[in-house]
Amino acid sequence: MTPTDFSVRRFLLPPARKECVPFVLIALVLGSAVAAGLWFWRHSVPVAGYGALFGVALAYGVYLFFRDPERVPPEDPSLVVSPADGFVCLLQEAPLPKELAAGGEPVWRVSVFMSVLNVHVNRMPVAGKIVKTAYVPGAFINASLDKASEKNERSLYLVETPEGKRFGVVQIAGLVARRIVRFVKEGDSLTRGERFGLIRFGSRLDVYLPPGVKPAVRLGQQMVAGETPLAKLG
């Protein structure tokens, strides 16, 4: 058995996505500019140091935004797991988005809202093949609102399990988010809990369950991507 890692590095410098590099550098440059400005204004090393400290703190915060910890899905293969960290902000019945399927009966939709403090790497709720994808540019209204499902920038995935059940998974950009990053494409087969994308700086994930499958979560419940059960397949 591998011993549990209680090292300082695990808690202070967790693994992070490579996409963080340009943003961390921008934060460091901004901090350097603030430090230089304070030096020319006050000609004081301590005052300039505050600017440098601001830059380091900002860069560290950006680094933590892109953190990508390991997750362990539950052993029961019939459990659908959350695709995102955050809390359940909406539980509604709605048809699959028109970009993924024309018409169709309403199914349960579970929406998980991610704040800027959450891990933003998204994980597949079930094992299956991505049979269709779509991207829709749009607005950046508050992602916790219902209308964000149709108004905001979003990336959509239709996932089919080996048993033939189909799920809709939708990444929705929020107020601060300006970029949805995909790690996968049509035709890819993913395991449950496998990483499939991320959204930068605050957003939401929608999961459309197959007909007859009900959510096993409640509004306000805290979710952990790849681990917290969201529903159970019959």
Image (spheres, rainbow, N blue to C red):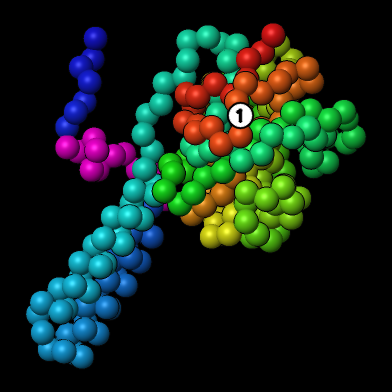
Q: Position of residue 131 (x, y in %)?
A: 72, 29
What residue sits 88% from the left and 30% below the top?
104
Report the residue marked by disc 1: 218
Q: Quadrant of the N terminus?
A: top left
Q: Height in image: 150 above or below 47?
A: above
For the point 36% across and 34% down, the residue is 69
Does residue 16 show up magenta in the picture? Answer: yes
Confirm whether residue 205 shows in the render.
no
Q: Amino acid at mark 1?
A: Arg
The part of the chain drawn in magenta is 8-19
Q: Position of residue 223 (x, y in %)?
A: 50, 32
Crowding at label 1, few (<14), some or many (≥20) Cα neighbours within 10 Å?
A: some
Residue 4 drawn in magenta? no
Rendered image quadrant of residue 97? top right
Tell me which residue sits at (41%, 21%) in the image: 72
Q: Residue furthest left?
A: 45
Name the outermost residue toward the right: 103
Residue 175's place in the image compared with 98, above or below, is below
Residue 172 visible to an observer of this rendering: yes
Provide the secondary structure element on which disc 1 rests: loop
- Number of marks drawn: 1
- In the rendered image, the vertical position of residue 127 relative to residue 175, given as above or below: above
**Residue occupying the point 71% across, 59% down:** 138
In this rendering, position of residue 105 left or right of residue 118: right
Q: Residue 192 is drawn in which quadrant?
A: top right
